[in-house]
Image: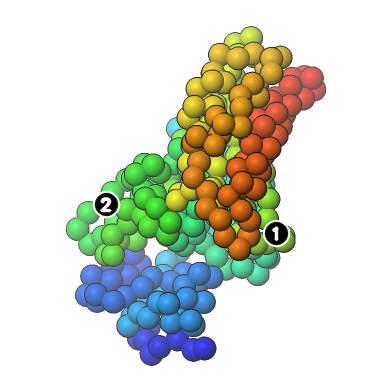
Amino acid sequence: MKPSPFNYVNPDTIEKALNALSKHNNAKLIAGGQTLVPMMNFRLSQPELLIDISNISKLKNITEDNKYIEIGSLLTHSNAIKSNCLKKYFPIISKAISNVAHHTIRNEGTIGGSIANADPASEWPLLVTLLESFIKVQNKKKKRKILYKDFFESHFITNLRDDEIITSIIIPKIKNSYGWSFLEEAQRDGDFAVVEVATIIEIGKNNLIKKARIAIGGVDEKVIRLKKIENLLVGFNLSENLCNFTKKDIDDQINPISDNHSSIEYKKHLSFVLIKKAINTAKEQILNVEDDR
């Protein structure tokens, strides 16, 4: 099937793109096009104007200061994987994004596109949630900085307005020593996750857990943080059993639905298994680093 007829512009600045966006009620932004183009081909999306922002070089940069890493929204998945800056501060990004579809799609798809699509089984929404990121957006009149939990609202629904462009993602640097883990179960390599889990465990003095983050995707209307389990872990020593919680503790915090990939019960079982494994993997990573010193 072919898309319905549309007009096309290719601005090279944010200002030109926002100007075009503000003048048309039925316009869509496109960069990598890995989600929008298939939707247009099936006529699930029928924009009258396509605004190609892929030539706005300003949105492809990674910058850092003492507190934050800022990633331009047009950075491709492949370039995120290759970035030495991201590998240094957030190696979990490279690990997780390596699971995005296949090499060709990673070369074209962008961070901003993935976040705007807001698929709760997708890797970037999981990372943005785990890393407590801010999403910077702007229209012709003003700029906004939106915390992750206020940006994602439901399946494929965000706080982004029709006349706004995502310009960057701001990730706070982690001050404490930490271990991390990313795990994903999919039917085939490159498929969307049935369940995906990411964990960061920060430690303070005497190997006591200072902060824990556990994000899970594919089991609710958006990626969620398992606050109950996170709070349980704080204060534990790494020598202790960190998985002294029950399956019900997990079940009470997620709301999976049955689909053509798996049943509700399977997703709940898989969530419990992956969460325990992710916590222990992050723990072992910290202990192994200490053993190497």
Most distant residue in the top direction:
206
Query: Which of the two discs, 2 and 1, labels the residue nearer the N terminus?
Result: 2
Q: Secondary structure at mark 2?
A: strand
The image's colour scheme reads rainbow
Q: Secondary structure at mark 1?
A: loop
Residue 43 image point, x, y percent: 43, 82
Residue 203 visible, this orientation: yes
Residue 54 image point, x, y percent: 46, 70
Question: Is residue 261 positioned above or below 146 on the image?
Answer: below
The residue at the point 64 percent across, 13 percent down is 237
Q: Which mark is residue 187?
A: 1
Q: Type of residue at label 1?
A: Gln
Residue to which mark 2 is pinned: 143
Residue 63 visible, this orientation: no
Q: State which quarter of the image contains the C terminus.
A: top right
The residue at the point 69 percent across, 18 percent down is 241
**Horizontal side of residue 258 vs 23, given as left or right:** right
Label 2 and label 1: CA atoms lie apart by 40 Å
The residue at the point 52 percent across, 62 percent down is 110
> Depth-wise, is mark 2 or mark 1 nearer the camera?
1
Q: Which mark is residue 63?
A: none
Residue 176 image point, x, y percent: 56, 23
Question: Is residue 44 positioned above or below 238 on the image?
Answer: below
